[in-house]
Amino acid sequence: MKTLRDFLDLVVYSPFYVIKAIWIQLIVLASMFVLGALIFIHYQGLDPLSALLGAVSTITTIGLYAPNIVIMPALEKVLLIAGIIVSVGSAASLLQATFTAAMKRELLTQTLATRKINRMKNHVIVVGYKFLVNM
């Protein structure tokens, strides 16, 4: 039972540990996709799913949906430019934070050890006193 809990901590808690480190970047990136979709819904008259596809395509620079930028209203251009800049910055920050959280194994190990200690009940810690005698 003890090793099963340790295994579940590693398998279940570890991904949440990484997500805990990057949740702000995930929210910013998701909101940029939604904002882009809202821009396409408003200015291009697309249905929500097509608008979301267009936003994801535009922000990730895949280019599946490319409206005619020559006839695009200036405000739509400015909003899309801002959205793309914020999204690219957020994606870069997301990758950096993900790698940092994944590489800092010491923090994860310490967190898992703390979780294990918090589950302990009715334990006795035995400490020698020899170092006190030599003082």
Image: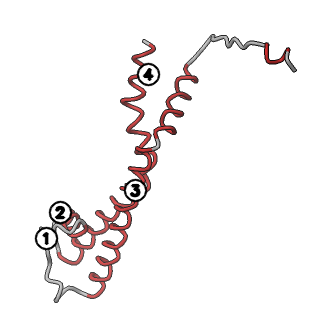
Q: Amino acid at mark 2?
A: Leu
Label 1 or label 2, whichever comes before in sequence order? 2
Answer yes or no: do the residues labelled 3 and 4 have beta carbons within 8 Å?
no
Answer yes or no: do the residues labelled 1 and 4 have beta carbons within 8 Å?
no
Residue visible at 33% across and 58% down in the picture: 30
Quarter of image, res 49: bottom left
Q: Most extreme residue toward the right, as rendered?
A: 135
Residue 16 x/y as whole percent? 41, 39
Return the residue at label 1. 65
Q: Amino acid at mark 1?
A: Tyr
Label 1 or label 4, whichever comes before in sequence order? 4
Residue 89 x/y as whole percent? 37, 67
Answer yes or no: do the residues labelled 1 and 2 have beta carbons within 8 Å?
yes
Answer yes or no: do the residues labelled 3 and 2 have beta carbons within 8 Å?
no
Alpha-carbon span between mark 2 and mark 4: 41 Å
Q: Amino acid at mark 4?
A: Asp
Q: Secondary structure at mark 1?
A: loop
Label 2 or label 4, whichever comes before in sequence order? 4
13 or 82, which is in the foreground?
Answer: 13
Label 3 or label 2, whichever comes before in sequence order? 2
Q: Secondary structure at mark 2?
A: helix
Quarter of image, res 1: top left
User: Residue 6 has which mark?
Assistant: 4
Q: Amino acid at mark 3?
A: Gln
Alpha-carbon span between mark 1 and mark 4: 47 Å
Neighbour tally class for label 4: few under 14, some 14-19, many 20 plus, Cα within 10 Å: some
Alpha-carbon span between mark 1 and mark 2: 8 Å
Label 3 or label 1, whichever comes before in sequence order? 1
Alpha-carbon span between mark 3 and mark 2: 25 Å
Seen in the image, is 1 located left or right of residue 43?
right
Return the residue at label 2. 53
